Image (cartoon, helix red, strand yellow):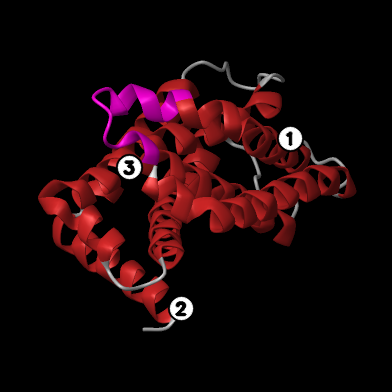
Amino acid sequence: MGYFSTVYNIFRKDVIEELKSREVVNSMLIFSLLVVIVFSFVFEPGSSAKEETVGGILWMSIVFAGILGLNKSMMTEVQGGNLNALMLAPVDKSAVFFGKVISNFTFIAIVEIITIPLFTVLYNVNLFGGGIWTFVTFLLGTYGFAVLGTIFSLISVNTRTREVMLPLLLLPILVPVILASVQSLNVFVMGRDTSEAFMWLKLVAIFDIIFTAVIFAVFDFIVEE
């Protein structure tokens, strides 16, 4: 089986499982919407501080909901020995990993597609002032989160305190991606020149490329350890 065929088949397997159970997306979506709704009561109508903080609130809701989903997704693989079977299969192990990354990216993106319209209404802000660059921000930020979240959920899934261990391992490494994504989004929300966001978009793009290359190179070693 070719590399990309393996990636596609892992992605297809995860999507079929999720369509049957709807456990991962539903849990992420409920958590994300709750965070967005609760924080919407913090700001007074017309508050000037709102536009400076909405980017952080939105990404915080996405990241914490995503961590919840990553834990559930990887636990599904561990239960019944699915993960061990995938690692023993005569295919490139990194292809299995990137299949999981794409499925996790898709699940997080679905949550974002549902959360963002509600967020826009509740906070009365225009997230898409940057046009196509707003989409690029979500694309790069979500991919960075998915690729790092998948590798650290794989590392932490066999520990007793995996629910605590995953955010402890993931969040410090994820800081550059979150920071760049929040700053880019704030530029668009506040109506500043979109060129100000390019520096942050370049930063998150570079981190995405570096993380992808490093994980691809050392994934076999991580699995064996």
Q: Tag 1, which secondary structure?
A: helix
The residues bearing labels 2 and 3 have C-alpha atoms spaced at a distance of 24 Å
Location of residue 216 (image quadrant): bottom right
Whether residue 216 is visible: yes
CA gap, disc 1 and disc 2: 34 Å
On-image quarter of the C terminus: top left
Using the rendered image of the protein, determine whether residue 128 is visible from the camera's viewpoint: no
> At 41% across and 71% down in the image, what residue appears?
7
**Residue pointed to by mark 3:** 69
Where's the N terminus, which quadrant?
A: bottom left
Q: Residue furthest bottom?
A: 1
Amino acid type at mark 2? Phe
Give the x, y percent position of residue 169.
47, 28
Q: Is residue 117 left or right of residue 75?
A: right
Determine whether, in the image, residue 157 is placed left or right of residue 65: left
Q: Is residue 125 above or below residue 128?
A: above
- Say what amino acid the circle numbered 1 marks: Gln
Instruction: Quickly name the residue at label 2.
Output: 4
Q: Which residues are magenta?
A: 155-168
Mark 1 or 2, nearer chain start = 2
- Considering only order in the chain, which callout, 3 or 2, is on the residue closer to the N terminus? 2
Quarter of image, res 51 = top right
**Residue annotated with mark 1:** 183
Observer-nearest of 19 and 114: 19
Of circles 2 and 3, the one toward us is 2
Give SS at disc 2. Answer: helix
- Answer with the quarter of the image where residue 189 lies: top right
In the rendered view, does 188 fall on the left or right side of 172?
A: right
Q: Element under label 3?
A: helix
